[in-house]
Image: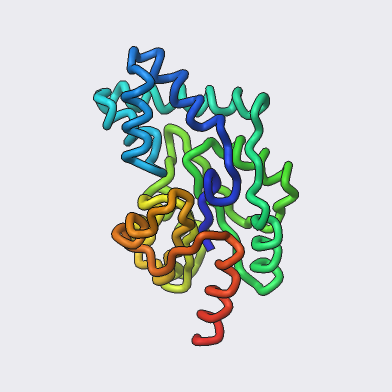
Amino acid sequence: MIFDLDDTLVHSDAVREAFWVVARAYEIDRARLTRTLDGLPGRLAWEVFVALGLSNTRAKAATKHFLAVLDELNTVAPPVAYPDADTTLRELAAHGAQLMLSTGSSTERAKRVLDHEGWDAFTVVLGSDGQCSKGDAHYDRIAQQTPDREWTHHAVTVGDSPQDMRLGAEHGVPVRIGIDRDGNPQTLFAAGATHVVSALAEVVSIVASIQIAA
């Protein structure tokens, strides 16, 4: 099971604040940034900066700046786990699910969050940096770490963004569960979600029903 982190397992005000710090450095006004973030929920930082008009090279530099700022802000405003996250992860692990994390944040930040919450069941933790960012690169990295060439055929992806759903569909993941945090499930379905839930805890019953059907 491939989980996203921010706005899936934890909520963090630091993410938007980090975007604002970097946008200000590039003379992008807050209203424009807000419109872009609202219009591109869950997109990778690089995609957001490109949508804001930065060239590929400048967007790459802005993304690096964003990740550094986010790490700093987390010491002041650490992410908060959703109430049902801990129980959900522990139930899935207890039933034999292999948990993986794929996030647009840095690997260091992701590991700090997991350590803080005591979520030690994740066997793979992939963050984003200049060499490997969330997206196709993460799927390629997972493929390198498993002998099963058809591992995606047995996978489940869980995330809050259309990007998470699209990635799963493009890589042949049959079960793509969208967490609706914005009150607009159709956006997730349109991006390829096979299920959309309003609470993380609902994932457990979906996975259980799939296992029974198999």
Indicate whether 122 appears above or below 55. below
Question: Which colour scheme appears in the figure?
Answer: rainbow
Q: Residue at x 35, y 14 (%)?
A: 26
Residue 55 in the image, given as x and y percentages of width and height: 25, 24
- On screen, residue 93 versus residue 191, left or right, reads right
Q: Nearer the viewer, residue 178 or 75?
A: 178
Name the residue furthest front: 183
Indicate whether 180 appears above or below 206. above
Q: Residue at x 48, y 30 (%)?
A: 16
Count of marks, rendered view: 0
Q: Is residue 149 visible?
A: no
Residue 49 in the image, given as x and y percentages of width and height: 33, 28
Q: Quadrant of residue 71?
A: top right
- On screen, residue 160 versus residue 81, left or right, reads left
Q: Residue at x 41, y 44 (%)?
A: 42
Q: Quadrant of residue 212?
A: bottom right
Q: Residue at x 35, y 26 (%)?
A: 33
Q: Nearer the viewer, residue 88 or 46?
A: 88
Q: Is residue 155 visible?
A: yes
Indicate whether 200 appears above or below 4. below
Q: Quadrant of residue 196?
A: bottom left
Residue 205 in the image, given as x and y percentages of width and height: 58, 74
